Each structure stands twice: as C-alpha cells, then as structure tokens.
Image (cartoon, coloured by chain):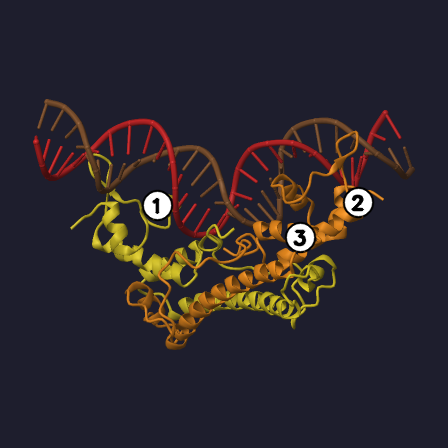
Chain colours: A yellow, B orange, C red, D brown
Amino acid sequence: MSMNIGEAAKASGVSTKMIRHYESVGLFPKAARTASGYRQYTVREVSTLRFIRQSRDLGFSIEQIRALLGLWQDRKRPSRTVRALAQAHIAELEEKLKELHAMKATLEHLVHCCHGDDRPDCPIIDTLAHEGAAPADAEHPSRGRTAGLQPGRTRRRLG
Amino acid sequence: MSMNIGEAAKASGVSTKMIRHYESVGLFPKAARTASGYRQYTVREVSTLRFIRQSRDLGFSIEQIRALLGLWQDRKRPSRTVRALAQAHIAELEEKLKELHAMKATLEHLVHCCHGDDRPDCPIIDTLAHEGAAPADAEHPSRGRTAGLQPGRTRRRLG
DNA sequence: GTCCACCCTCCCACTGTTGCAAGGTCAAGC
DNA sequence: GCTTGACCTTGCAACAGTGGGAGGGTGGAC
C-alpha cells in the first residue's frame, strides 16, 4: 500500500527532487516516515501529486496550485472561485502570448529584410544597434512589465 | 563626454543593477573607473547597452546577445550568421507560443465547461484531479522539455 | 561642515528545476 | 557475515534575470 519516494515519483510523474521540494515549501504535506527515515506514500498522496503535476502542466504557479489544492480539498467551495482562478491564469497566458507574438513578428520582419548571405550588411544587427527599432506591428513593450509564466520550466540550457 | 553609471542607465534604458550585472558576467566590458572607483561610460558604451536592451526586448538570452555583440563588432561577419541566429530564436518563440497556446486552449475549454456559480461541482478541479486531462487540442506536452524564454523577464511576483 | 544624491561592493529574494556530494538503508547474492 | 548496487537521506550550488537592501564612500551645492 505505501511506497517509497521513487515509486511515488514514477506513479505521479513528479520527480523525487520536486516531491521533496514541494514538501519543503509546504505545498505538499510532510510524508510519513519509516523508522529509518524513508518517506512513505499512499495512493492518496500520489493523486495529490498528480493534481500538482496536472496544474503545473497547465502553467499554474506554485502559489496558484496552493490555492487550487485548497479548493480541491474544500468540498463546499463554489465553482465560481475555481473558475475565477483559471480565468486569471488565462489572462496571464494571453499577456505572455501577446508579448511573444510581438517579439516574433518583429524578428520575422527583420529576418525577412536580411538577405542572409556572405555579405556583412545586415538589417537585423542594424536595428538592434540603432534605437527606433521598428516593431513589426505592436508598439514594442518597453522592457520590464508584462509578467510571464513559469521561469523554471523554460530555457533549459539552450545557450 | 563620460558619465556615471546612473546617467548611462538613463541614456540606455538598462538599469544600473543590470549594467553591473552584465559587466560581472562578461557580457559588457569592464568600465573605466575614476580615482574614487566610479564607473565611467562614453556614448560608445551607451550604444552597446542600447544594443543589449534591444536584444533583450526581442527575447534573446544573455548568451545569444553575447553572440550578437560579437557579430555586431565583427564588421566582416556574413549576414547569414546573424539571420540564422534570429531564426533559431524565432523557432524557440514558436515552441513557447505553441506550449502556451495549448495551455490556454485547455483552460478555456475547462472554464467553458464550468458553470462557475455557488455550487461546488467543478470540472476544472475534477480534470486536475483525475489524470487523463483531456487537452483541448494538442496532446499535452508531458512536462519537462520545451525550452522557453527569458525566465527573468517573466512572472514578476504575480504570486 | 553638513546634506543629499549618487556611487561602491556584497548578499538575499524570487521563479522552478536539476546536479552533485557525502552519507545511511535495504535486499540480494556469495 | 560481507559486499554490492539501487535506493534513500540531507544540504548546497547552479541556472536565468531582475530587484531590493545593507553598510559605506564620494561629489558638489549650500
């Protein structure tokens, strides 16, 4: 019935590292331990882990998942609350999508302008060098704002 | 002619924090110093900073910018190289866009299914709880891969 | 001589995930 | 009994990029 962390990881799709991490930040309740200190998990806890993974896959942040877990546990929550949380997240996604779309559009415009051969002159470099940019369609979002999603799930040593 | 870091920051749009950071990671050459240790910048360096900011605004990573700066400095680079770099970045953006689109689609589907009133039953929570998900269109990208963009520029304490 | 804005260098926070290290535990085989 | 190897424990560091603050020095105006 009860399993070690490795088995729980396989069953839930959450890595052992992450299970411990979620426990440490209080997203996940402290697991029971054997006499020797091994964490023990039941199927119930595994389904909670699956819930977390599903939520992460949809881009919810840890804090949002904390709220979702609370709502999940609360059998009397109004579905209105859950829906609002989801909609807020959709709005975040849209924000981010808009931002990325703008970047992509600008880049595509530049790539389109660049002949891309052996000659050195390049409108891409020129645009980066000389302010004024020339955003493809949207006015560029002068750096800084526009919150995004899940930094950790992103750019895994692409450099 | 030469200015302190604050002035350079205003002129370039890069914060003083970031200028020092870029210097520390070697993206930006070490600035000259006054006798008392103040960094001194010329218009030339400010334009480099602007180049960096423009690149960041387009979502390039520090490492990509390092490459772009090299190409910028190299008067004899083939525009082909720059173009390839930009196209690779576009591909990354597309990857990320796809991922976010899928999330959004799934969420919208769920929100659509949820009546969102005072009653507790909620398909959103149910879907998160019971594996099998039911992605709106794309099969869900089992966590982990799909590199993304600019963790830092994202999710600024939205939690 | 004092005040304030600016500069300096550190360290810490945040997001989420992974890696490594140094050790303990368990079940298997010999 | 003893070794081996797979597993578990903890903790610390790193990645990306940015912001915040502490604690102290500098520069120029009054």
The answer to whether residue B54 is left or right of residue B159 is right
Q: Which residue is mark 1?
A: A17
Residue type, mark 1 in image: Lys
**Kind of element beneath mark 3:** helix
User: Which residue is at a point 58% across and 67% down the rendered structure image?
Assistant: A104
Find the distance from the CA under tag 2 to the CA under tag 1: 48 Å
**Inter-mark Cα distance, 2 to 3:** 16 Å
Question: What subunit carries mark 1?
Answer: A
Most foreground residue, C19 or B74: B74
Of labels 2 and 3, earlier in sequence is 2
At horizontal 43% and vertical 69% (from top left) the residue drawn is B102
Residue A147 x, y percent position in the rendering: 56, 59
Q: Vertical placement of A56 versus B63: above or below?
A: below
Q: Which residue is mark 2?
A: B42
Tell me the amino acid under the disc marked 3.
Answer: Ile
Q: Residue at x 35, y 57 (%)?
A: A52
Residue type at tag 2: Thr
Which one is nearer the viewer's eye here, B60 or A11?
Answer: B60
Q: Residues within 10 Å of mark 1 (few under 14, many from 20)?
A: few
* Res. B26 image quadrant: top right
- Whole-percent x, y for residue A79 in the image: 38, 70
In-front residue for pair B20/A131? A131
- Looking at the image, which is closer to me, D4 or D24? D4
Mark 2 residue crowding within 10 angstroms, few (<14) / some (14–19) / many (20+): some
Mark linked to residue B52? 3
Up-down relation of residue A79 to residue A57 (above or below)? below
Provide the secondary structure element on which disc 2 rests. loop
Which chain is indicated by disc 2?
A: B
